[in-house]
Image (tube, rainbow, N blue to C red):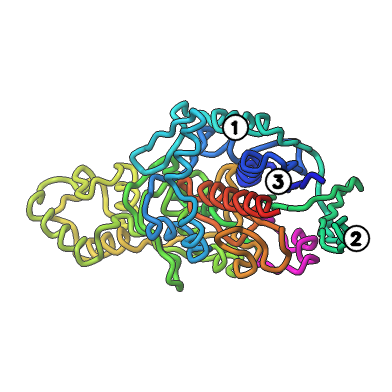
Amino acid sequence: MKNKLIVIGGGAAGFFCAVNAASQSPGLEVIIVEKTGKLLSKVRVSGGGRCNVTHACFSIAEMVKQYPRGERFLKQAFHHFFTKDTIEWFQKRNVKLKTEPDGRMFPESNSSETIISCLMQEANKYKVQILMNLEVVKIETIFLQQPAMNGFEKDRKQFIITCKDQSVFDADFICIACGGYHKMEQFTWLSRLGHSFEVPVPSLFTFNIPGNPIVELMGISIEDAMVKIDGTKFSQRGPLLITHWGFSGPAILRLSSFAAKKLAEFQYHFSISINWLGGFNENSILAKLKVIREESASQKIINRNPFNLPNRLWQYHLKLCNIRDETRWADLPAKQQNLLSKQLCSQQFYVKGKTTFKEEFVTAGGIKLDEADATTMMSKIVPHLFFAGEILDVDGITGGFNFQHAWTSGWLAANEISRIMKEK
């Protein structure tokens, strides 16, 4: 009897598991079951439609630091399939990747369709079946009597999969790669298998500051800012973007990711402090201002921007400190000088709500990692049940890290299924 693998989810992790399992095990029937009418949807929108395949980091110790959740789990997994393996896998299929200055890696074509076409071609080549608009609602296990030389043995386990439309499938292996769930009740069908999960909360989002005058400066970006969530240990340094709703950019997205669970506790109402000059503190800013006062005493402050901030942002800070346009450096009162220094290194904003980062929604939470084997992705509770991708309690920051987890977990699940098949 031919063995069957059903992959639940038609995203990056699901496809990678399916095509690798099919290529490594010719006697295995592989079916992808996708609940929507779209395949590889995050692959399509990632990186503005270019697909940020992975990140050019070749140190496992450094790579795992980019995952707010799952660091130890991935440290084991990456030893078996890592960045260089991803690059080689696509290169063998005539998809070359290029590295951008910030380390993000994209197909040379600059189009996500290149990655989608590659995965679809692999699926066609190895006869992976794809069934769409089917939502799995229940998985059960049964045992079948299998003929043997001396009679019958009760040793062949099968999964029975039931979908919302009442269609039923059987399988010898299942890989759950349905992405991250946003609500606890969506995990019910997995809980019935004996698995537990970390409560899902959003990750990778921007900060809303409705009604604050700073939004009038939308479009301005600062290359090196430090953002801290007041009253917590969480802070990030990097580029910051002012938007018409508040703040975005790498520093904000990284901060939202690492602080995802704490911000959910705050119900997304919290205060932040921004150091607009990431490399300075209040004392070093004051020291710099004193030097400028001596060097540019006769110049108007509005015309002498000593920190190379965008001019509109510099003017905004001067206005908040009640420094008039005609004020010269020599005439700057100590009180306003101190106020300007404090403003530049620790300006406070109250955040009320969040905005999802484009369509690249990422969820913190998922199947608890101590219930899955980090080297095979197989469940420790249900043999021959596997997990891949965001359904696990693993999530990374932007930059290709979530896709690398998808490729790694999908490949490891496929590799273990292939190993089991060879032993049959």
Residue placed farthest to the left in the image? 295
Q: Closer to the N terminus: mark 1 or mark 2? A: 1
Which residue matches tag 1?
A: 116
Residue depicted at 83% across the width and 61% down the height = 141
**Residue 108, above or below 9:** above
User: Which segment is the magenta one?
Assistant: 179-199
Q: Distance between the residues labelled 1 and 2?
A: 48 Å
From the top left corner, tell me how far across and down residue 50 is, in percent.
50, 33
Amino acid on which the number 2 mark rests in the picture = Gly
Residue depicted at 40% across the width and 64% down the height = 235
Q: Nearer the viewer, mark 1 or mark 2?
A: 2
Q: Quadrant of residue 336?
A: bottom left
Residue placed farthest to the front in the image? 150
Q: Nearer the viewer, residue 291 or 151?
A: 151
Which residue matches tag 3?
A: 9
Amino acid on which the number 1 mark rests in the picture = Ile
Taking the image as shown, residue 389 lies to the left or right of residue 185, namely left
Q: Nearer the viewer, mark 2 or mark 3?
A: 2
As drawn, the label of residue 151 is 2
From the top left corner, tell me how far across and down residue 153 is, in percent.
86, 63
Taking the image as shown, residue 49 lies to the left or right of residue 347, namely right
Residue depicted at 52% across the width and 60% down the height = 351
Answer few, some or many: residues within 10 Å of disc 3's Cα (few below 14, many 20 plus, some between 14 and 19): many
Taking the image as shown, residue 156 lies to the left or right of residue 352, namely right
Answer few, some or many: residues within 10 Å of disc 1's Cα (few below 14, many 20 plus, some between 14 and 19): some
